[in-house]
Amino acid sequence: MRKRVRIALTGNPNVGKTTLFNALTGSRQHVGNWPGVTVEKKTGRINRNGYDIEIVDLPGTYSLTAYSADEIVARDFILEEKPDVVVQVVDATNLERNLYLTTQLAELGAPVVIALNMADAAEARGDAIDRERLSAFLEIPVVRTVGTRGDGIGDLLDAAIREVKTSPHHKHAVCYGAEVEAMIASLVDALAIDRALTARYPRRWLAVKLLEGDENVLARVREGPASIHVQNLLSSIDVDGYEASMADKRYEAIAAILPQVHRTDTRGATFSDMVDRVVTNRYLGIPIFLALMWGAFELTFTVATPFMTVIDTLVAWLAGFATGSIEPAWLGSLIGDGIVSGVGAVLIFLPNIFILFLILAILEDSGYLARAAFIMDRPLHALGLPGKAFIPMLIGFGCNVPAIMATRSIEGEKDRLIAILVNPFMSCSARLPVYVLFAGAFFEARAGGVIFFLYVLGIVVAVVSAKLFRSTILRGESSPFIMEMPPYRLPTATTSLRHMWSRGSLYLRKAGTVILFGAMIVWLLASLPYGVEYGSEGSLAGSIGHLVEPLVAPLGFDWKVAVALIFGFLAKEVVVGSLGVLYGTGEESLSGALFADPNLSAATALALMVFALLYMPCVATLGVIRKETGSWRWTGFAIAYGLAVAWLLAFAVGHLAPVFTGGV
Amino acid sequence: MGGVYPLAFLVAGTEATIADIRGGREMRVRLSGMGLCPEARVTIRSANQGSVIVAVGDARYALSRGIAAKILIRETQETV
């Protein structure tokens, strides 16, 4: 029978856990050069020497005391699931800080193996680490790995398997000095009566965590029989002083080992430091950021244009061909008017989407993303958002679903809730087709400016909403900013292109599933009841549209737009897909058909774009809001608030626009 | 000099030793995990109206003014 082994990958943020996980399991989990990429545990399987090994990749954490949702995931897995071996991935270029977590894992009595990762980078700059001596001092196996090349993964697995077979496990404790140790001893005695707790965790570890004020451990002790005695002990001492000296002793213990195992040159300012002097400069920081954003925007639209024209022509030809030549006629209509026009209307924007994701990948891989969060902390803080919320906001330009997941690294609960609620206003890639279609049809030369306005509007609505929530339903200060700045890395073409593909291909898959499904439903509704003129007011689609029309009539939307908006709830691209189906354009392009519709003016088009940007989040986004807030109330709030804001702003824009555009 | 200042007052290039960290225990335990604890040697890499990028060993942390004001340091050496 095969023996099963479960290995957890833990370590500080941005040390390469997921890169190593991908190398170990052959997975393609998303990686990036900023702390907080992984916010949920990911599992993979592999066989080696007759062992069935399950590998669990955890979010990064600096210690076993957790402060944010992603750190809680990591801590709970190690404490509660008790994996057979904990592989701590250590950044070889930053040994001291990384070993702090090692001391905590050792105190917990967890079987640990160290993967000395990024060993190539450490060696390249002249560091020499004596792994055998390090291993002997720590009583922990140390394996050299380079995750990006897959070096050392076989050795790592072998060391982990050996560690499972080794029992009992060694106890390597930091000595905290006479005074603290006396207190630890008293707490250890006091805890003895709480059998349930001490059966699960080492008493010394519990005592240390109590002295550090770990809320999680404190709460568990309070539930048990040792509660009163422990609280009396804790109230008898100056806990603050203890905790400071304990951290000090841990680093002292590390500092005692390091010079014996680690040779390194003293280093001055690095390349990254020099870049940061410019990029985070008081006067240059924000202008540089804005210039980069403008450049990204320009690239997304200008580079894509020729590709779009090609796809557009192809789709129109194919739709016309299918409708005209496929027998029976209803099948031709389903394929031509329904599938090709609906899905094709969305596929036209594939070039924009891929370029957008490439830019986001470059931002993530270069290390600039963390700087952008830092630069924006000050202006955002004034509006009640922590700077850390800025990373999810930028990711939201791609898709709100991973963006809302990324809010897990935000520490304060209210901060995180606000960041989740405002994220859907960040204009995701699914809304881009709506803009390009309508801006192109009605604004021609000014299309670029109109689209830029919509992106800015999304950001403005997000920050104004944050300010509003902060001063009404979610009062309080946003938490102060602290984030590790990863070293800058030149993104390689292969990794950035791969990231682009992995996210962009989701869009393609969506086109083949949700959007295809939406297009077919709309086609069916537009064709029934039998014998009705396709896409006319007498069809089922017309009836549904007319039902909702009174609600959106003040915005200038007719029944076709109403139907498109209803189905846009599935995914916002479906707004475009549905219109493609309803207008059943044949060889004429959809934008031409829209322009020719007497019910649509430039002002209505603008109102429609504003509405599509802001109205309720799509199904997938609502799902992730529900999951991350754990509350239907907040999910319902996100829908109601989005609809209200969208309606009001679309109304305002629709009525004000003619004033500016001279009554177009 | 020998005085004790908030980290937020320092200019880029200054080397210093952390003397004390004010503020709640939770914040201090958290900073300890990142290597920011008393007696740690830090270098200011970039300073901007109180918010700083600080080097501790080979790690770089960006801190907003709110935190940088709570970390008290002793200057050890002035470069630049």
Image: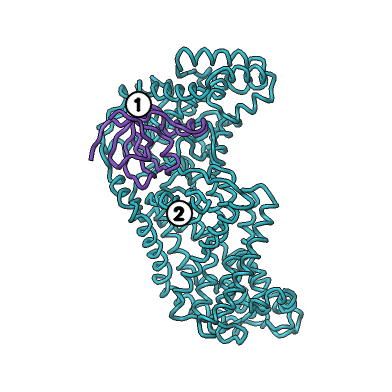
Provide the residue designation for mark 2.
A379
- The colour chain A appears in is cyan
The residues bearing labels 1 and 2 have C-alpha atoms spaced at a distance of 46 Å
The one nearer the camera, A615 or A135, is A615
Choose the circle earlier in sequence order: 1 or 2: 1
User: Residue sitting at 54 percent across and 85 percent down?
Assistant: A663
Type of the residue with mark 1: Arg
Q: Nearer the viewer, mark 1 or mark 2?
A: 2
Provide the residue designation for mark 1.
A131
Q: Chain of mark 2?
A: A
SS label for mark 2:
helix
Question: Viewed as shown, does residue A94 lie left or right of A356?
Answer: left
Callout 2 crowding tier (Cα within 10 Å): few <14, some 14–19, many ≥20 = few
Q: Chain of mark 1?
A: A
- The colour chain B appears in is purple
Q: Quadrant of the N terminus of chain A?
A: top right
Q: Position of residue A557 (x, y in %)?
A: 64, 78
Using the image, determine if residue A450 lies above or below residue A623. below
Type of the residue with mark 2: Pro
Callout 1 crowding tier (Cα within 10 Å): few <14, some 14–19, many ≥20 = some
Image quadrant in which you'd find residue A257:
top left
Give the number of the disc on residue A595. Answer: none
